[in-house]
Image (spheres, rainbow, N blue to C red):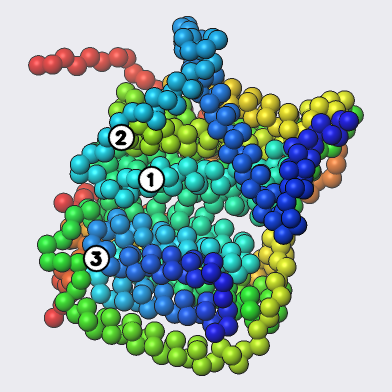
Amino acid sequence: MIDKADQIFVLLQHWLISFLPLALQQPAAVVIGVIGIISVFPAIFALTTVFERKGLGRIQNRLGPNRVGPFGFMQPLADAIKSLTKEDVVPSSANGPVHFLAPVGLVVAVFMGFAVLPVGRNMVLVDMDAGLLFFFAMGASTEVSVFMAGWSSRNKYSLLGAMRAVAQMISYEVVLLLSSVAVVMITGSLSLTKIVEAQNHYTGIFPHWYIFTPWGLAGFLMYAIAATAETNRSPFDLPEGESELVAGYHTEYSGFKFALFFLGEYLAMLSISGLGTTLFLGGWSAPFSFLTFIPSWFWFFSKLMLSIFVFIWMRGTLPRLRQDQLMNFAWKFVLPFTLLDLFVTALWRFMGEGILRWIVCSAILLAAYFVMGRVAMVRKHFGPRSYRYAE
Amino acid sequence: MTPLGGYLLIAVLMFAIGLAGALVRRNAILVLIGIELMLNSANLNFIAFWRYGPHPEALTGMMFAIFSIAVAAAEAAVGLGLVIAIYRHTHTTEIDKINRMKG
Amino acid sequence: MTVVFYLIAALTVAGALAAVLLKNLVHCALAVTVAFGGLALLFLSLDAQFAGFVQILVYIGAVAILIVFAILLTRGSDVPKDGVFSPTWLTGVAIAAAVFAVIGWAVINSVNAIPQQAAVPHVTVHDIGIALVGPYVLPLEIVALLLTAATVGAVIVAMHEKGGSE
C-alpha cells in the first residue's frame, strides 16, 4: 500500500501505455513523462509567482495581491490572461528573427534541464549516465538566449543588462560546476539517480544527506550563492533591477514574449533548486528513517518549495549587490572557497570513517572562511563623511 | 555510402566552409570563427572514426576530441584577446588594414 | 542513412554556411552557435554522449559567448563600408573547393575498405574517468598547464595598459 502510493505515477504511466500496441509503448511512455513535466512544473511556477508576491508583500509590511480568488491565489490566472491578450510591441529597428527566437531558446533550454531530475523513486524522465553534465550543458545554453534578447532590442539599457547578466552567469557557472564536482567525487558517478541513492541511507534515524557533512554544507552554501546568481535573483539581480536598467534585457518585450521570459526565469530557478535538492539535500529521500512511509515525490517537492521559500526570503531581505561587488565576490571569495572545498572533500574521502575527519574538515573550512571572508576582505575603512555642494 | 562515409563527408564539408570563411572574410573575428569550424570538423572526424573503427573501448578518439575541445577553447580565448588588443591600437578589426609592417 | 542524420547534417551545414556568408557579425556568431549545436547532436548520434555534452557546455556556453563579447568590444555591429568580402575572395573559395574535392574524393574511394564496427560501444563516464587518470594522465596535466597559461595570457593581452594608448 505504501509502495503503491510511492509509485502511483509510475503505475499510472504503465496503465496508460498498456492500451497501446507494443511497438508504440516506449515512445508513449516518454510522451506521458513529458506531459507530466510540462504540466507540473509550470503549475508550480504559477504557485511560486503568487507565493512570491504575497511573501514579499508580507516581508515589506503590506498585503500582496488579494483580489483575485480566495486570498489572491488565482492571481496567476489573471496574469496569464493579461499576458496573452496584451499587444506585442516590437521596436521597428529591432532585429526581427533574433528578437523572436530569444525567448523561445530560453524556455526550450530550461525545459530540457528538467529531463534528468529524479522527482521520486524510479521517476526520472531520462536516466542518463552523464545526467549532471547534461543539466549544466542546458544551463550554459541559456546564456546565448539572454544575449540574443539584449542585443536584438537595439536598446542601450537592454544591451547593458544583457552583458552584465552574461558576465555574471559565466562567472558563477564555474562556481556551480565546481561545487557539484565535490558531490560527484564522493558518489563516484555523474548520474543523478545514483547520487540520490547514495544519500538514501540512514544511521539511526539521521539521513546521509550530503548537506550534513562539513564539505557538503560548504558546498551547498556555495551552490546556493551560485544558483541565486545564475538565475539573476536578488541580491544578484542588477541586470534586471527596475531602478537601474528599466528591465534589463527584457525591456523591449511585451505580452506573451515577456511571459515566456518570466516563465523561463522562474523555471530556471525551479530546476536549479531541484538540482540542489538532488545533489545536497537527498533528492526524494525522507529526512528521518521513520518517515519513509510518506511517498518520495512528496519529499522532493517539499524540499523544492523550501528552496523557493528561501529564495523569496533572500529577495525580500537582502539589498542588491553592485556589478563590481558581485564579480569581485565571485572570483575572489567564492571560487577559492569552492576549490578549498574540493580539497576538503578529497581529504574526507581518503581519511577513514570516524570523528577525526569531521574535526579536521570542519576546522579547515572554518579557518578558511574566517581568514578569507573576514580578514582578507576588510580593506576599506570609511573616513569622516565629506560633503560636496553644487557650485 | 556507409554511415562512416556520411559523417566524414559532413566533416570535410564543414572544414572547407571554415577554410573558405577564414580566407574570404575581412574581419579578424570571422577568421577565428572559421578556425573554430575547422577544429570542430576535425573533432567530428575523430569521433566518427572512434565509433566505427576497431577497438572503441580504447577510447582514443573520444579522448582526442575532448582534449581538442579544451585546447580550442583556450586558443579562442587567447585569439580573441589578441583581436581586442589590436583593436585598441589600430581601431579597426579588418585584417586588410593592419599592414603597418608591410614593405 | 537515417532521416535524422540528414536533418542534423543539413542544420549544421546551413549554420556553418550562414556563419561565413552573413553580413552582420552578430548574426554570424549566432549561426556558428547553431552549427556547434548541430555538431553536438551529431556527436550524440554517434553514441559519444560525454563529447556531445562537453561540446555544448564548452563551445555554446563559453566560446560562442567569447566571440560575441569580442564582437561587441570591437564595435563589430556596424557593417563596414567596403563590403565584407576581401578583394581576393575567388582565390579563397577556389582553395577551399579544391581541399573539399581532394579529401572528399579520398573519403569516397576508400571508405568501403575500412572494416566498420556496427555494434554500439558501451562507454560510461566512469571509463572515461579511469582513462583520463590512467593512460591519458600526461595529456591531462599538460592541458591543465595549457589552460592556466591561456587564462593568464588572455587576461594580460586584453588588459588595459597603464598609461593607455588613446
Percent position (x, y) of residue B47? 58, 73
Question: Circle 2 is placed at which residue position?
Answer: A88
Return the chain for callout 3: B
Residue density around tag 2, few if under 14, some if 14–19, many if 20 or more, within 10 Å: some
Return the chain for callout 1: A
Question: Disc 3 and disc 1: Cα gap in Å?
Answer: 26 Å
Residue density around tag 3, few if under 14, some if 14–19, many if 20 or more, within 10 Å: many
Nearest to viewer (mark 3 / mark 2): 2
Which residue occupies 45% across, 91% down?
C105
Residue A311 relative to residue B24: left or right = right
Which residue occupies 58% across, 83% down?
B2
- Same chain shared by disc 2 and disc 1: yes
Return the chain for callout 2: A
Q: Secondary structure at mark 1?
A: helix
Q: Measured along the vertical axis of the image, is residue C125 above or below residue A115?
A: below
- The kind of residue tagged 3 is Asn
* Sequence-first disc among 2 and 1: 2
Q: Secondary structure at mark 2?
A: loop
Percent position (x, y) of residue A386? 25, 15
- The kind of residue tagged 1 is Ala
Residue density around tag 1, few if under 14, some if 14–19, many if 20 or more, within 10 Å: many
The quarter in which the N terminus of chain C is drawn is: bottom right
- Residue A370 visible in the shown view: no
Question: Circle 3 is placed at which residue position?
Answer: B27
Question: Circle 1 is placed at which residue position?
Answer: A102
Residue A67 relative to residue A176: left or right = left
